[in-house]
Structures are given as C-alpha cells and as structure tokens.
Amino acid sequence: MSKKVAVIRKANFNAAHQLWNPDWSKEKNKAVFGLCANENYHGHNYTLEVKVMGEIDAETGYVIDLKIIKDIIKNEIEERFDHRNLNLDTEEFKHLNPTAENIAVVIYDLIRAKLDAKYDLHIKLWETEKNIVEYPC
Ligand code: NI
C-alpha cells in the first residue's frame, strides 16, 4: 500500500472588495466590518496555498504533476479574481460577502470541480500576513 503525501502549490492574486451585509444599516456595517466596509472598496494581496493529498503513483513517483494544479489555479482562480473587484466583477460574490472565509470556500469549490476525485483538497488563504483562513478544517 503506498503512502499518502501532500503536495502544495502557492499563488498570489490581488483583488478589491467591500464587506457589507445589505440587511443591515450603514452604521451596523461600519461597526462590524470597520475599514473593510469602505464604500469605495479597498484591496488585498491574497496568498493562496492549495494542498492536494493522495498516494504516490508508482510509475511517476508523483502524487500529482504540480503543473496540473498550477494550471487549475491559473484558469479557475487567477483569471477569475486577479485584479478584479470581487463585489462588482465576479458572479461568485455578487450576492455573497467576500470575506476571506467565503473566498476560501468558493476557491475550494472551483478547484474541487476540476480535480480528480481520488485526491483530497485543502485551501489556505492569507488575506494579510496575519489573517489566514483554512477550508476544510
Ligand atoms: Ni478587506
């Protein structure tokens, strides 16, 4: 029986957002989301870590060719979100608050849809150097 190993590919993307709950007053949004509720948006330099777990293939010695992960990240994440306003420019966050938590879940679902079911997947997303979310946990 072969060993399970995790391989990790990192990526970066820059995007603008505004955190806002349309069911709340302006005052409550400002109180809860602070600077992230700024009406004129603001940006983050996101760092993404995509971890794929599986068994080492006896023929290649790979769990998965990292180029496959690189291409999925490019096609599904970077082309969709890099240099975009998440609230205004993306379908995914038109009606979903673009918190780091929600972004991580959306990224997971987009990558999961393109990744062979035999692999496990884990997403880690840095919104800032100090604020990090993981999904699943
Ligand atoms: Ni923010």
Image: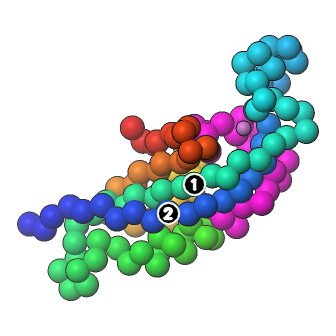
Q: Residue 47 has which mark?
A: 1
Residue at 85% x, 47% y: name it. 88
Give the magenta range. Answer: 77-103
> Which residue in the structure is indicated by mark 2?
10
Amino acid at circle 2: Lys
**Most extreme residue toward the bottom, as rendered?**
59
In the picture, measured across the screen, residue 36 lies left or right of residue 9, that is right
Q: Quadrant of residue 23?
A: top right
Residue at 91% x, 39% y: name it. 40
**Most extreme residue toward the left, as rendered?**
1
Q: Quadrant of the C terminus?
A: top left
Residue 15: x and y, percent?
Answer: 74, 52
**Most extreme residue toward the front, as rendered?**
129
Q: Is residue 91 visible?
A: no
Residue in the foreground of this view, choosing between 95 and 126: 126
Residue 117: x and y, percent?
Answer: 37, 61
Is 85 in the magenta?
yes
| Depicted 109 relative to depicted 34: above or below | below
Q: Residues within 10 Å of mark 1 (few under 14, many from 20)?
A: some
Q: Quadrant of the N terminus?
A: bottom left
Residue at 47% x, 70% y: name it. 69
Is 80 in the magenta?
yes
| Depicted 32 relative to depicted 88: above or below | above
Q: Residues within 10 Å of mark 2 (few under 14, many from 20)?
A: some
Residue 32: x and y, percent?
Answer: 72, 18
Q: Quadrant of ligand 1?
A: top right
Q: Secondary structure at mark 2?
A: strand
